[in-house]
């Protein structure tokens, strides 16, 4: 764990409203300003704290050109603290919302800088800690910003401006008023494009005292952000790698979840499966005033009780080492699509040179020294797994390892084969869920081995390629143009893909896609189904495991021929102990 930057972080981590984690609620400025009759508010607030053990309230002083006065903040602060609920401040650095989509403050103009400084000062006067909601991004393209950008890219301009306002306005102002204050920046869940809007997972954790993680996933298909559910887990672990020990919690909301209450709850499960120290519920007004969400507190309260009963039995999360540099771009959310196919990941913001199974998606090719790093890993016995997008981006440099290239040709496929003899032959004919479009990879027969293939007309196309290199191996997975079509690979192909990642894992999934696997370093695993129907799913377990215990039901499940069969119902979690 990184050394704590100030004592308030360590102190706040020691206080939890549940046995194993804390739960907070975020209160936007308008919610706070609406509290005029505290007795009436208390009756409404009981809908939340009567179902959820609230340990902290974040009280916002500014959002969208609306302010809360110091006097009102102090009154509301006193109300929460009288109930034993700790308080922290909050800022949402957005404009008035009159433009398209969300509008950030403009820091090229003096008025934007003054708003930021005033909000920081107000928080530092009232609280010992405050958090930036995940609007601490830059998307202004006004005349002043265009002029100040000059010849820089928008990304570089925004990164430079973010560093300046964080150092010179935020941290300097806060620490001058309150030297021991804990200043937190919350990162959004859309980590794939952070640098384009000024977020930097190297610079900002170094400047701020601590960070926070947005774990919202909503509806992956019918929402603007199209985020696979596994992201709620992956992003929590990814940001932990950016600031070990200083990633204080995960934050999610109920929006675009009314189509299915379990879509809201899944955010909570996966945030806690990732071992979050705190969960923040956004937001106070929606959960106690909006009829669309008033059933949510009771449900999420039950979730917290359930997970708290076994969370301390889970060790540290583990998985295949997924390297994603902070400036990576390409194959957006590929880790989460594969996570939805039962591949457990442990993400790294720095290259995981000591790991024996390393996954590199397209974004990892942004690392200028990636070839050298891969070579060193495989010479020392690591298995490196890459995507077809990584092959495309690396280009001819990839041929250092194996003669595979990304062609301009495509194929529509629906039937598949696998190999029972390490690629000497491919056998079987397995039908996928529906036809999908894949890129065609060129490779050299008898130099590279095809472990899974898709059938064409008197032809087939590689889905998984593998060959040895040094003391290790290099594998290539063909990613469909629509990455969600990974779910349409038949289980025989998915099992080949899962097998690439399972070298260090005690279990692997044998079943269809949309079954998630979470693995911990003390022989505990969680299996979760996102299928819309009930299905029998096998777990393949390594030798030496004699039985599997369902921790929640306190029953033992026998192992037969190295397998355990689970009856997976939609949104059901199995929390299991592997018994040797």
Image: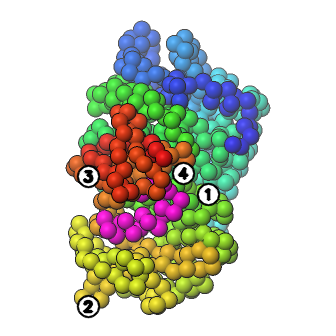
Q: Identify the mark nearer the N-term, 3 or 2.
A: 2
Asked which secondary structure carries label 1, the reply is loop
Asked which secondary structure carries label 4, the reply is strand
Q: CA distance from mark 4 to mark 1?
A: 15 Å
Q: CA distance from mark 4 to mark 2?
A: 42 Å
Q: Which residue is mark 3?
A: 536
Please say if the residues under marks 3 and 4 sit with CB atoms less than 8 Å apart.
no
Quadrant of image for the N terminus: top right
Q: Identify the mark nearer the N-term, 2 or 1.
A: 1
Q: CA distance from mark 3 to mark 1?
A: 36 Å
Q: Identify the mark nearer the N-term, 4 or 2.
A: 4
Q: CA distance from mark 3 to mark 2?
A: 35 Å
Q: Residue at x 30, y 59 (%)?
A: 512
Q: CA distance from mark 3 to mark 4?
A: 25 Å
Asked which secondary structure carries label 3, the reply is strand
Q: Identify the mark nearer the N-term, 3 or 1.
A: 1
**Disc on res. 318:** 4
Q: Is residue 284 above or below residue 425?
A: above
Closer to viewer: mark 4 or mark 1: 4
Magenta span covers which residues? 491-509
**Disc on res. 349:** 1
Q: Residue at x 65, y 41 (%)?
A: 245
Q: Which residue is mark 2?
A: 458
Q: Position of residue 382 (x, y in %)?
A: 60, 69
564, 293: nearer the viewer: 564
Instruction: Report the number of discs.
Output: 4
* Viewer can see residue 137: no
65, 483: nearer the viewer: 483
């Amino acid at each position: 764990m990184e050394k704590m930057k100030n004592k308030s972080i360590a102190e706040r981590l020691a206080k939890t409203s549940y046995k194993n984690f804390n739960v907070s609620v975020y209160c936007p400025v308008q919610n706070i300003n609406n509290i005029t009759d505290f007795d009436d508010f208390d009756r409404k607030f009981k809908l939340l704290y009567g179902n959820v053990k609230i340990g902290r309230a974040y009280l916002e002083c500014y959002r969208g050109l609306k302010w809360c006065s110091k006097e009102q903040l102090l009154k509301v602060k006193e109300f929460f603290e009288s109930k034993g609920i700790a308080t922290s401040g909050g800022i949402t650095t957005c404009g008035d919302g009159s433009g398209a989509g969300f509008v950030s403050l403009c820091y090229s103009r003096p008025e934007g800088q003054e708003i930021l400084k005033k909000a920081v000062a107000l928080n530092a006067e009232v609280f010992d800690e405050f958090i930036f909601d995940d609007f601490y991004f830059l998307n202004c393209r006004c005349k002043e910003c265009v002029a100040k950008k000059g010849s820089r890219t928008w990304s570089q301009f925004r990164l430079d401006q973010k560093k300046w306002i964080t150092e010179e306005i935020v941290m300097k102002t806060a620490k001058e008023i309150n030297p021991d204050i804990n200043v937190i920046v919350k990162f959004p869940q859309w980590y794939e494009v952070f640098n384009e809007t000024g977020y930097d997972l190297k610079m900002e954790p170094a400047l701020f005292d601590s960070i926070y993680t947005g774990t919202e996933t909503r509806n992956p298909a019918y929402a603007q952000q199209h985020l696979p559910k596994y992201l709620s887990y992956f992003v929590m672990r990814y940001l932990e790698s950016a600031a070990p020990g200083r990633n204080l919690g995960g934050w999610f909301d109920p929006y675009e979840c009314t189509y299915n209450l379990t879509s809201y709850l899944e955010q909570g499960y996966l945030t806690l499966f990732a071992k979050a120290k705190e969960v923040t519920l956004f937001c106070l007004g929606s959960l106690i005033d909006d009829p669309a969400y008033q059933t949510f507190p009771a449900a999420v309260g039950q979730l917290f009780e359930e997970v708290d009963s076994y969370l301390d039995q889970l060790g540290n999360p583990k998985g295949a080492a997924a390297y994603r540099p902070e400036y990576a771009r390409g194959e957006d959310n590929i880790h989460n699509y594969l996570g939805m196919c039962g591949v457990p990941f442990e993400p790294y913001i720095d290259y995981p040179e000591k790991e024996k199974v390393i996954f590199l998606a397209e974004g990892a090719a942004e690392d200028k020294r990636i070839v050298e790093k891969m070579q060193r890993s495989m010479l020392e016995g690591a298995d490196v797994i890459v995507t077809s997008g990584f092959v495309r981006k690396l280009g001819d440099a990839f041929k250092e390892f194996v003669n595979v290239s990304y062609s301009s040709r495509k194929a529509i496929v629906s039937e598949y084969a696998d190999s029972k003899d390490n690629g000497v032959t491919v056998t079987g004919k397995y039908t996928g869920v529906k036809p999908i479009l894949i890129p065609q990879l060129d490779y050299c027969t008898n130099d590279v081995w095809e472990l899974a293939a898709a059938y064409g007309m008197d032809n087939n196309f590689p889905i998984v390629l593998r060959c040895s290199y040094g003391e290790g191996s290099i594998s290539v997975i063909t990613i469909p143009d629509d990455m969600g079509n990974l779910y349409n690979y038949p289980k025989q192909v998915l099992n080949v893909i899962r097998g690439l990642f399972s070298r260090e894992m005690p279990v692997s999934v044998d079943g269809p896609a949309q079954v998630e696997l979470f693995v911990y370093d003390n022989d505990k695993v969680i299996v979760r189904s996102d299928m819309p129907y009930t299905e029998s799913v096998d777990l393949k377990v390594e030798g030496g495991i004699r039985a599997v215990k369902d921790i929640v039901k306190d029953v033992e499940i026998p192992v037969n021929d190295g397998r355990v069969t689970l009856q997976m119902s939609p949104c059901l979690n199995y929390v299991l102990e592997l018994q040797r």
